Amino acid sequence: MKNIAVIGAGTMGNGIAHVFAQNNYKVNLIDISQDALNRGINTITNNLDRLVVKEVISEADKSNTLNNITTYTSIKEGLSGAELVVEAATENIDLKLKIFKQLDEEAPINAILATNTSSISITKIAAVTKRPDKVIGMHFMNPVPIMKLVEIIRGYNTSNEVTKTIMELSENLKKVPVEVNDYPGFVANRILMPMINESIETLFNGVAGVYEIDTVMKLGMAHPMGPLQLADFIGLDVCLSILNVMFDGFKNPKYAPCPLLVNMVQARKLGIKSGEGFYDYSNSRKAEIISKQFR
């Protein structure tokens, strides 16, 4: 397997394309927006430049990586010859089902279809295709070029052969694959999102401020980043979507999103991507505490 198609040139998509291309896979990066593709390639280029400066890779490695990536705005053209398709679109169930119907129609018949979803049922996604045995979850962590973990999620009908292939492929990418079963949130977000949500509840209830909550978790629990800053980094809209998926899937009130999170997303305070969340990112790359009441 050497020919990979990646659907979506956003944060996760360009990171996935980067990792495959740097490991000498041929990558077709697909997005309906040429501007998004250009931004994705610029991000990959900038990340490679940093690796060159740190002498992790050479200029030749950088050039080879970029030469391994071809961009397309047509899904049909971009899927030509693909042996594996990795979907990395927005965490929206309706959008993903629509994409997988199209992937099933356009991708080569033997191609494996993978999704980078962080919470949505693989079984449900696979059910809209005629190849459910070839549908699997590949949940990469952000930032993809740095983070080692890949959650490999088997749907109800995912074959042993496909699972083994994707586990081995992930190791070829110098990642650490962990196989998990198909339940809402899988492992990573089933544990992480309730912690983030409870941190937001703690802020909402006035127990402590942003700095205090994050400092307790960093210095007291040895977390490299506080949960509120991590939520900003993930995107508050993404956190809300994942919590809603888990709440709908488990029907358990412990997964109900905090009203503060809902209000912040409605106000488009989404974290780093919007320039403001629990921290202010508008004036510099360094997060600054926002001095206001989060109620």
Image (cartoon, rainbow, N blue to C red):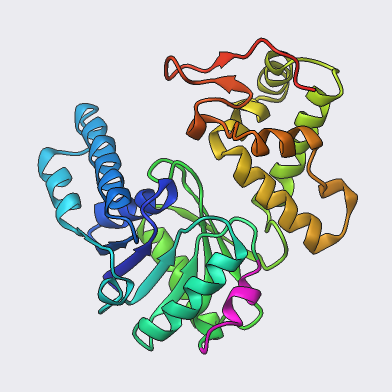
Q: Residue at x 39, y 54 (%)?
A: 13
> Extreme right residue here?
253
How far across and down, in percent of the image, does residue 202 sit?
82, 26
Q: Residue at x 41, y 40 (%)?
A: 146
Which sits in the foreground, 154 or 117? 117
| Number of residue marks | 0
How far across and down, in percent of the image, does residue 160 sit?
55, 81
Q: Residue at x 72, y 61 (%)?
A: 184
Seen in the picture, residue 265 relative to 216 is either above or below; the reply is below
34 to the left or right of 186: left
Asked if residue 236 lies in the magenta stretch, the reply is: no
How far across and down, in percent of the image, does residue 230 sit?
60, 32
Where, quadrant-wise, is the N terminus in this rendering?
bottom left
> Extreme front residue here?
267
Q: Which residues are magenta?
A: 121-130
Q: Residue at x 44, y 14 (%)?
A: 283
Where, quadrant-wise, is the C terminus in this rendering?
top right
Q: Quadrant of residue 47?
A: top left
Which sits in the foreground, 245 or 4? 245
> Extreme left residue here?
60
Q: Is residue 56 visible?
A: no
How far across and down, in percent of the image, does residue 231 sit?
62, 34
164 to the left or right of 1: right
Which sits in the foreground, 263 or 101? 263
Asked if residue 122 lies in the magenta stretch, the reply is: yes
Q: Is residue 136 visible?
A: yes
Q: Quadrant of residue 26?
A: bottom left
Seen in the picture, residue 215 relative to 137 is either above or below; the reply is above
